[in-house]
Amino acid sequence: MRFLIRMFISTIAIMLTFYLLPCVSLDSFTEALATALLIALLNTLVKPVLIILTIPVTLITFGLFLLVINASIIMMASNLLNGF
C-alpha cells in the first residue's frame, strides 16, 4: 500500500513538472505512471552502484555530486521511454 502511495505521488510530481517546465513533454497519465515506475526501478538498482563508484568525487564536492547522479537517473529514464 505504501508503495502505491509513493508511486501515485511520484506520478503527480512528474505531471506537475510537465505543466511547469516547457522542456518536459509527456503523452498521458499512464506515461507519467510508467516514468515513475522506471525512475523507482533505476533508483533501486542503478543509483547505489553509482554512489559507490563516485564516493571520492562526492566527498570532494561535499555531496553535491549526488545532484549529478539524480539528473543522470532522470536522463536514463528519458532515454528508455519514448513519451517522456
Image (cartoon, rainbow, N blue to C red):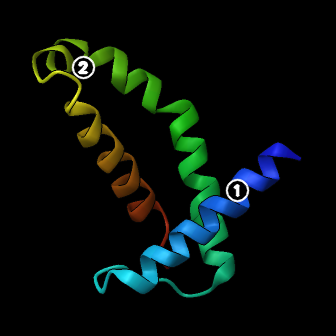
- Measure the alpha-carbon separation of dots 2 and 1: 28 Å
Residue 70: x and y in percent read: 35, 43
Could you tell whether 23 is left or right of 74 in the image? left
Residue at mark 2: 54
The residue sitting at 60% across, 73% down in the picture is 32
**Front residue of this view, candidates 13 and 77:** 13
Residue 7: x and y in percent read: 70, 56
The residue sitting at 23% across, 25% down in the picture is 63
Residue 29: x and y in percent read: 66, 81
Residue at mark 1: 7
Residue type at mark 2: give it. Thr
Residue 83: x and y in percent read: 49, 79
The residue sitting at 35% across, 15% down in the picture is 52
Could you tell whether 15 is left or right of 23 in the image? right
Q: Is residue 4 visible?
A: yes
Q: Secondary structure at mark 2?
A: loop
Tell me the quarter of the picture where residue 49 sits.
top left
**Front residue of this view, candidates 45 and 56:** 56
Q: Secondary structure at mark 1?
A: helix
Judge the density around disc 1: few (<14), some (14-19), many (≥20) Cα neighbours within 10 Å.
Answer: many
Camera-side mark, 2 or 1: 1
Residue farthest right in this picture: 1
Q: Is residue 25 visible?
A: no
Residue type at mark 1: give it. Met
Tell me the quarter of the picture where residue 17 sits.
bottom left
Q: Is residue 75 above or below residue 16?
A: above
Q: Is residue 66 above or below residue 57?
A: below
The residue sitting at 61% across, 76% down in the picture is 31
Could you tell whether 21 is left or right of 28 in the image? left
Which numbered disc flags the more N-terminal residue, 2 or 1? 1
Judge the density around disc 2: few (<14), some (14-19), many (≥20) Cα neighbours within 10 Å.
Answer: some
Residue 23: mark: none
